[in-house]
């Protein structure tokens, strides 16, 4: 199944369950960001998902099974970007 921005837009502002050990954690889908398509290349519209978590939820850069309840869970590679003072920010890029 090819994932599209529309698959995630209903989940903006909602919690997403991440399969981690020893127990799952929840992060919030903060934003779906659509990127400009590449000219002359017939591929899906590139997009990014931005997630937020409290500072005490630390995820290393890896692929996780994320369950937002719509045809999931989906294995998604997330990377932590510069954390803010009060929360961590993660990004998943789809191109």
Image (cartoon, rainbow, N blue to C red):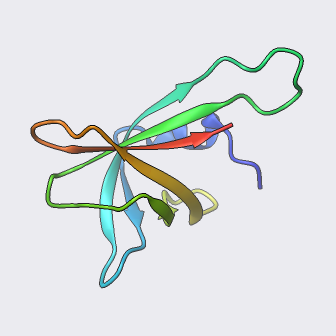
Report the residue at 87% width, 24% height from top. Answer: 41
Report the residue at 47% width, 62% height from top. Answer: 62
Image quadrant containing the N terminus: bottom right
For residue 94, above or below residue 27 = above
Q: Indicate the position of residue 63 as horizontal and vertical percent values.
A: 52, 63
Q: 14 or 77: which is nearer to us?
A: 77
For residue 88, above or below residue 74 = above
Q: Is residue 87 left or right of residue 93?
A: left
Q: Is residue 57 left or right of residue 74?
A: left
Q: Is residue 82 left or right of residue 2?
A: left
Q: Residue furthest bottom?
A: 22
Report the residue at 51% width, 27% height from top. Answer: 33
Q: In this view, does 54 lie to the left or right of 69?
A: left
Image quadrant containing the C terminus: top right
* Quarter where residue 90 is shown: top left
Q: Indicate the position of residue 11 as horizontal and vertical percent values.
A: 45, 43
Q: Indicate the position of residue 69 as horizontal and vertical percent values.
A: 52, 60
Tag count? 0
Q: 82 or 49: which is nearer to us?
A: 82
Q: Indicate the position of residue 27 as horizontal and vertical percent values.
A: 32, 54
Report the residue at 68% width, 39% height from top. Answer: 4
């Amino acid at each position: 199944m090819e994932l599209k921005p529309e698959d995630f837009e209903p989940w903006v502002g909602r919690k997403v369950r991440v399969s981690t050990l020893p127990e799952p954690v929840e992060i919030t889908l903060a934003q779906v960001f659509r990127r400009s398509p590449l000219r002359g290349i017939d591929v899906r519209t590139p997009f990014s998902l931005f997630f937020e978590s409290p500072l005490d939820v630390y995820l290393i850069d890896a692929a996780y099974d994320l369950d937002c309840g719509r045809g999931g869970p989906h294995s998604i590679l997330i990377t932590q970007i510069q954390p803010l003072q009060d929360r961590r920010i993660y990004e998943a890029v789809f191109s």
